[in-house]
């Protein structure tokens, strides 16, 4: 390790305790780390990771390091870094980290370039910022990359667009699309941690309030369920008719955002798209409305339009900015419109990230073994890897499964044995 850029190395011991606590809830990743230490499947590989710098991510980094990878870590969001964790990785594990909670955009992009200066063989993204920067601004470092992995829905959308345009220059595995990732990380992780972030930031009672969830993908499903569990009257907004129908059948009220904006008390976007809450929505919101985002980028909320409507903006609580509008109303934006579950809380519980990061580790191993056979496009996580992670997780939870008998296998694979 030669360089790093973190807030304070003196926080390292506190970070180590936080990492150790998270590791207790990550038995699948622990088993993979133990195997990696013996087999060293990533030996000789330089790996640049752009992820949320949390205790759970730290356990992934030490797993990759145990597998032989030369790892560098940078933040995938300016507000998601746990500074004590960054310090521990630097001081105790000698992993270069470029991440400071609250860093400005200039520093954020400087840190991404520092990760690319590592000349990675493998990229590991949460939002595709490293891949995008490599292709747009740092083509000097492209030639050595054999492949990458992507953690988020937003990132996978960007990468598939690049592949469709013929612009993607190396294969990428969409870790986000693994069932052991999006079923659990997005639904249970985002659902719980987003509610946690909103409550920590505001200390408001959710019971009895109209809670508007924009988007009913896996994240939206989890968030709507948890908001209802807190006693909120949940409204879902959607553009997809099948998802909207599912939300209705799940017992939620579904309406356009323009209507929801007039009745909502608390809003949260989880779509991955731009301007989901826009100027015309702010124009009809209640005085005191609380607006947040749990999608990857803060573009889901058109904050510049809100600023143009305002006469004053001030921080009234940590991670709560109050906008005083020209007509006298006040609207509150949480965490600068960035991921509220990481801005004001700690992100997903470790037991959920255990499966997501197991996918990351095994996807990196798969890439090393198979990169020369893969085309320059986006691939899903192999089914056998997904099932392996599920089985390891169940075993760690003490849950046993049935096995098919020979007769059952024969029946399922035969067309001759009818009903």
Image (tube, rainbow, N blue to C red):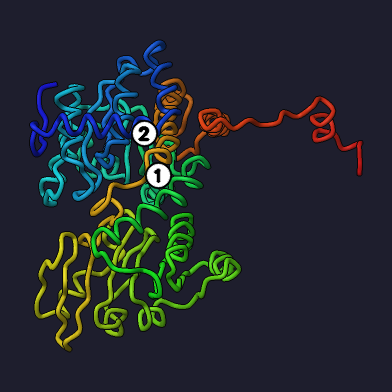
Task: Work out whether residue 185 can be spotted.
Answer: yes
Badge 2 is on which residue?
148
How many numbered badges does the structure rendering display? 2
Mark 1–mark 2 distance (CA, rounded to whole Å): 16 Å
Task: Check disc 2 and report its element: helix, strand or loop.
Answer: strand
Q: Residues within 10 Å of mark 1 (few under 14, many from 20)?
A: few
Quadrant of the rendered image containing residue 36 = top left
Q: Residue at x 10, y 35 (%)?
A: 5
Q: Nearer the viewer, mark 1 or mark 2?
A: 2
Badge 1 is on which residue?
166
Q: Residue at x 63, y 30 (%)?
A: 400
**Position of 53 compared to 323: left or right?**
right
**Position of 148 compared to 236: left or right?**
left
Q: Residue at x 25, y 35 (%)?
A: 18
Where is residue 242? Give x, y as percent. Answer: 58, 65
- In the depicted view, which residue is nearer to us: 407 or 177? 407
Task: Check disc 1 and report its element: helix, strand or loop.
Answer: loop
């Amino acid at each position: 390790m030669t360089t790093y850029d973190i807030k304070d190395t003196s926080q390292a011991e506190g970070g180590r305790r936080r990492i150790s606590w998270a590791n207790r809830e990550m038995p699948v990743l622990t088993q993979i780390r133990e195997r990696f230490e013996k087999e060293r499947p990533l030996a000789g590989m330089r790996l640049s990771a752009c992820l949320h710098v949390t205790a759970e991510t730290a356990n992934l980094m030490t797993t990759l390091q145990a597998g032989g990878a030369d790892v560098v870590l940078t933040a995938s969001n300016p507000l998601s870094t746990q500074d004590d964790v960054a310090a521990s990785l630097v001081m105790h594990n000698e992993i270069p980290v470029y991440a400071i909670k609250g860093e400005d955009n200039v520093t954020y992009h400087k840190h991404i370039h520092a990760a690319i200066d590592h000349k990675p063989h493998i990229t590991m993204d949460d939002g595709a910022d490293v891949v995008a920067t490599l292709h747009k601004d740092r083509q000097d470092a492209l030639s050595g990359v054999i492949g990458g992995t992507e953690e988020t829905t937003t990132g996978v959308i960007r990468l598939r667009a690049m592949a469709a345009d013929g612009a993607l220059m190396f294969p990428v595995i969409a870790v986000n699309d693994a069932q052991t990732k999006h079923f659990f990380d997005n639904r249970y992780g985002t659902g719980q941690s987003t509610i946690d972030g909103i409550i920590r930031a505001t200390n408001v009672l959710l019971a009895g309030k109209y809670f508007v969830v924009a988007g009913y993908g896996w994240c939206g499903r989890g968030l709507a369920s948890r908001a209802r569990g807190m006693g909120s009257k949940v409204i879902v907004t959607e553009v997809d008719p099948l998802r909207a129908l599912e939300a209705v059948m799940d017992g939620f009220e579904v309406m356009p955002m323009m209507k929801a904006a007039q009745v909502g008390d608390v809003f949260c976007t989880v779509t991955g798209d731009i301007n989901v809450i826009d100027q015309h929505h702010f124009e009809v919101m209640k005085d005191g409305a609380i607006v947040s985002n749990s999608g990857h980028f803060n573009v889901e909320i058109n904050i510049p339009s809100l600023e143009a409507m305002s006469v004053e903006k001030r921080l009234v609580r940590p991670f709560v900015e109050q906008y005083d509008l020209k007509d006298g109303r006040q609207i509150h934006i949480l965490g600068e419109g960035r991921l509220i579950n990481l801005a004001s809380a700690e992100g997903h519980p470790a037991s959920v990230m255990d499966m997501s990061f197991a996918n990351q580790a095994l996807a990196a191993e798969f890439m090393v073994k198979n990169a020369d056979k893969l085309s320059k496009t986006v691939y899903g996580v192999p089914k056998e890897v997904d099932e392996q992670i599920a089985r390891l997780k169940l075993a760690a939870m003490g849950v046993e499964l049935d096995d098919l008998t020979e007769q059952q296998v024969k029946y399922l694979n035969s067309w001759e044995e009818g009903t």
